[in-house]
Image (cartoon, rainbow, N blue to C red):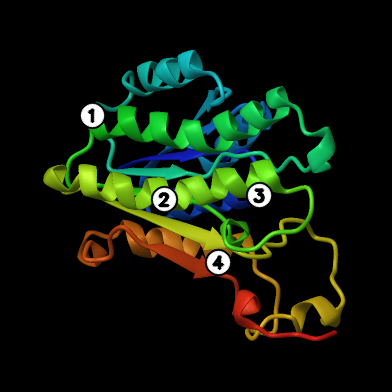
Amino acid sequence: MRNVIVTGAANGIGKSIARRFVENEDRVFLVDKDAAGEKTAAALGTNAFFIQADLAVPEQINRTFSDISEHASQIDVLINNAGISAFRNFDELTIEEWDHVINSNLRSVMLMSKYASKIMNNGAIINIASTRAAMSEPGSEAYAASKGGITALTHALAASLAAKKITVNAISPGWIHTTEEPLDDYYHDMHWSKRVGRPEDVASLCMFIAQKENAFLNGEDIQLDGGMTKNMRYD
């Protein structure tokens, strides 16, 4: 049984990732500031543990690992999924808003990885970035910078943690639909895979990367977008 940490696991992509690893009979620590994570963990069974924490606050990251230590002395897989998507007109973007996005999305990845790597050997760190690290729309400066930082941090960590045989990779999802609301075919047809992504797509790739037999994959940022960002469109 592996010990797995999934941040931002109360809902959406993180919830699907946590479910996939529990189904694999791993012990999973769901970390989220949203109290809904308690219900999510309860539904997943006795191998799921919820820890409520705001990862923008370093002290709460420290407490998270203190809580984890009551159940596990070693971590095998860390999946840094937590993040906020805040968009603001650039002229109106405040320092406080910028810092909150960077600290929530990027600094948290560095600190979670730093703590986890101290109790990890021959393990895997998976960072959830975004295709927005390479493409943008107006008002996305803070979010794009945080996700671009994650992709750069990923290969830097891979270099630093190689001696401990810890692989570090990033997944950059494109459009992942996290609700039950139906979408028009127009949006599905933007993708060469002919559908918008699902949280389960990210969970499946996380499971693949986390397998020891796939440890030759290291320092990479994998675009998971159904071909959307490579699709040249004029409509």
Residue at 76 percent of width and 79 percent of height: 188
The disc at residue 201 is 4
Crowd rating for badge 3 (residues with CA inside 10 Å; few <14, some 14–19, many 20+): some
Q: Are discs 3 and 4 less than 8 Å apart at CB?
A: no
Q: Nearer the viewer, mark 1 or mark 2?
A: 2
SS at mark 4?
A: helix
> In the rendering, at what x and y percent does residue 147 appear?
55, 49
- Residue picked out by circle 3: 12
Q: CA distance from mark 3 to mark 2?
A: 25 Å
- 3 or 1: tag closer to the N-terminus: 3
Q: In the rendered view, would you say 233 is above or below 153? A: below
Q: Quadrant of residue 103?
A: top right
> In the rendering, at what x and y percent does residue 9 appear?
57, 40
SS at mark 3?
A: helix
Residue at 26 percent of width and 34 percent of height: 117
Q: CA distance from mark 3 to mark 1?
A: 29 Å
- 4 or 2: tag closer to the N-terminus: 2
Q: CA distance from mark 3 to mark 4?
A: 12 Å
Disc 3 marks which amino acid? Gly
- Residue picked out by circle 2: 152
